[in-house]
Image: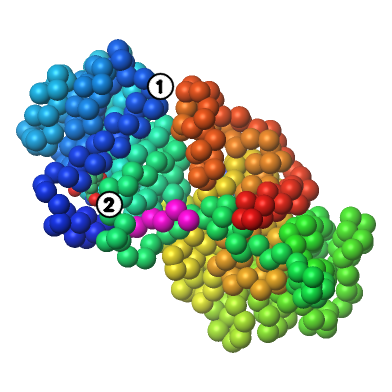
């Protein structure tokens, strides 16, 4: 797992650690990690030109102190002070002593830089960039390394209110910050590198966690010699309609290729389902009399109307875990859920989440973690909020690091529903099933698209969406090599990719 903490937690841990150390130790550790990362990104320092954007807090201090190290290793470093009277005095003196330049904070000073270090604000930043900083940032042409957090990104929420720095990479200290892992902030951070400054023993449980291969491998339900199809999990799928038969085919496919022992399909798309998946068990009646299942998926392509509402009501009346998606979300009430004895998982995208919360879609997209928590609390469910960084409620909340924007294709969510339903049927608790489903779904997208996305980042910054494996692979690439953009995929490609992805992840846990 990659764990992230809130700013107030980081500050408390930092205070506790600092009380045990000589003054300046933490900033020196942070600056050493930052300087080493800049050197690696540039592939050498001698004769390279580095510009520092320096704000009035300790974030600017980190940049100045790293600058001093970079000068000593042969780089030409100039500092642009946004607030000259308040720049960190000790760090400023260190840069001067090493031979760095203090220059006027004008756009012209950035023209010849090979690398720009963003030390404007870190965890103390409030709101977007102020006008002078925004003007300088707009003039930057070189790759940017953000110190701790890209300036203008809210470290706790990932919200970007106004303009913010778009970094090729972010070097963060002590622990990840929520805003580096959640969109929109995540998209501004580039590849994120964590520098250990000794905060670990002082940090309590995380606020947010991003799973990695090994975490997901531990959760994958592998069959044993004693397994039969019922023991592995039977998924009920109540999906599709005359109008949207394809959603049923995709959800059943996601469940079958996502590890279900068997799938019972209920609904009007029986012919289409059987034509594509002869192994499915189809039922002509209502969900209530379909026979025993270990989990239900209800909603994809269900359509609107009294029949759809009745289907959702019958599924929710069952005593097994239920995943509600898409059209099923129209018929959900907190009252129905309160009467349930088994877990309920909902999987809205931002538009559906906005409707459930009675707010604008833009509000959900700006503050995704807060929307997720409100959904879970208001409906008494586990919530998965889809998007470029899919979130799952729990303690800690989870954020999915895999995926590609190519996943934004019709029917892709139906596959996720079936896949996650299979994991629920196998007995995974809802938070783990949702996190595992999103992780495998994202990897399937990448595999099918044969690339991560149209991001074109450089050097160890590699992919837009990093797992530890991605970062290790990107670090081995020569600096400047752009990331593979990939190609369009269909939802059925995702279904086909689930088997190979499952194999890759489970093998990594052996
Ligand atoms: N907390 C920790 O564990 C450590 C913190 N360190 C560094 O210290 C940083 C936090 O330092 P500070 O608390 O001094 O805070 P920051 O340096 O993040 O920012 C505070 C300053 O920025 C100004 N400011 C706030 N919003 C602004 C905006 N939108 N535009 C322009 N200026 C704005 C404030 O007036 C204040 O002077 C961290 O992000 C990190 O870089 C490291 O040195 C090492 C350890
Ligand atoms: N820009 C994006 N980048 C990465 N993943 C995305 C993006 N947009 C959508 N996705 C993913 O694609 C899937 C789309 O699901 P959904 O919105 O329900 O579509 P549909 O109803 O067409 O199946 C979700 O898993 C979501 O997380
Ligand atoms: K910064």
Q: Which residue is mark 1?
A: 43
Residue 431, image quadrant: bottom right
Q: Which residues are magenta?
A: 1-8
Q: Is residue 453 above or below residue 234?
A: above
Q: Residue 358 versus residue 91: which sits nearer the camera?
A: 91
Q: Is residue 2 magenta?
A: yes
Residue 315 located left or right of residue 284: left
**How much space separates mark 2 and mark 1, taking CA atoms?**
27 Å
Please tell me which residue lies in front, 374 or 482. Answer: 482
Q: Which residue is mark 2?
A: 198
Label 2: element kind: loop
Does mark 2 have its CB less than 8 Å from ligand 1?
Answer: no
Badge 1: residue crowd in 10 Å (few <14, some 14–19, many ≥20)? some
Residue 366 screen position, x and y as percent: 42, 51
* Snapshot quadrant of residue 131: top left
On the rendered structure, is 446 left or right of 154?
right
Left or right side of 120 for 483: right
Q: Earlier in the sequence, mark 2 or mark 1?
A: 1
User: Which mark is on residue 305?
Assistant: none
Residue at horizontal 8 percent and vertical 35 percent from the top:
89
Please check the rendered image and state whether residue 349 is part of the magenta-colored stretch, yes or no: no
Residue 218 percent location from the top left of the image: 60, 62
- Under circle 1, the secondary element is loop
């Amino acid at each position: 797992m990659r764990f992230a903490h809130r700013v107030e937690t980081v500050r408390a841990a930092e205070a506790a650690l600092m009380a045990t150390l000589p003054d300046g130790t933490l900033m020196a550790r942070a600056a050493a990690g930052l300087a080493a990362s800049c050197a690696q990104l540039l592939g050498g320092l001698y004769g390279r030109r580095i510009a520092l954007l320096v704000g009035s807090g300790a974030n600017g201090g980190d940049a100045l102190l790293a600058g001093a190290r970079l000068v000593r290793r042969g780089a030409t470093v100039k500092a642009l002070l946004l607030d000259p009277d308040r720049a960190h005095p000790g760090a400023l003196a260190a840069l001067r002593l090493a031979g760095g330049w203090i220059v006027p904070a004008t756009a012209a000073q950035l023209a010849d830089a090979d690398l720009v270090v963003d030390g404007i604000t870190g965890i103390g930043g409030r709101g977007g960039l102020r006008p002078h900083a925004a003007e300088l940032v707009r003039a930057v042409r070189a790759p940017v390394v953000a110190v701790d957090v890209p300036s203008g990104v809210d470290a706790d929420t990932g919200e970007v209110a106004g303009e913010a720095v778009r970094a090729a990479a972010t070097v963060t200290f002590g622990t990840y910050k929520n805003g580096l892992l959640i969109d929109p902030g995540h998209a501004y951070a580039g590849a994120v590198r964590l520098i250990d400054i000794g905060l670990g023993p002082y940090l309590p449980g995380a606020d947010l966690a991003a799973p990695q291969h090994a975490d997901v491998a531990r959760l994958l339900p592998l069959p044993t010699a004693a397994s039969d199809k019922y023991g592995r999990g039977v998924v009920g799928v109540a999906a599709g309609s005359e109008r949207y038969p394809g959603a049923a085919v995709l959800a059943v496919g996601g469940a079958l290729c996502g590890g279900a022992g068997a799938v019972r399909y209920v609904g009007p798309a029986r012919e289409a389902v059987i034509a594509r998946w002869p192994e499915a068990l189809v039922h002509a009646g209502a969900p209530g009399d379909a026979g025993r299942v270990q989990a239900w998926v209800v909603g994809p392509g269900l359509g609107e109307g009294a029949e759809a509402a009745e289907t959702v009501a019958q599924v929710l009346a069952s005593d097994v875990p239920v995943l509600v998606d898409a059209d099923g979300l129209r018929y959900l009430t907190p009252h129905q859920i309160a009467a349930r004895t088994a877990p309920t998982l909902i999987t809205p995208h931002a538009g559906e989440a906005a409707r459930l919360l009675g707010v604008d879609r833009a509000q959900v997209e700006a503050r995704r973690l807060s929307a997720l928590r409100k959904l879970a609390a208001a409906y008494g469910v586990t919530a998965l909020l889809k998007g470029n960084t899919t979130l799952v409620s729990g303690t800690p909340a989870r954020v999915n690091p895999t995926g590609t924007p190519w996943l934004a294709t019709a029917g892709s969510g139906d596959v996720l529903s079936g896949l996650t339903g299979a994991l629920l049927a196998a007995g995974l608790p809802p938070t783990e099933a949702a996190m595992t489903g999103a992780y495998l779904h994202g990897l399937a997208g990448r595999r099918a698209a044969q690339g991560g996305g149209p991001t074109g980042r450089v050097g160890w910054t590699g992919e837009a969406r990093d797992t530890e494996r991605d970062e290790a692979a990107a670090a081995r690439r020569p600096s400047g090599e752009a990331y593979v953009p990939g190609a369009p995929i269909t939802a059925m490609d995702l279904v086909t990719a689930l088997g190979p992805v499952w194999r890759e992840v489970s093998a990594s846990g052996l």
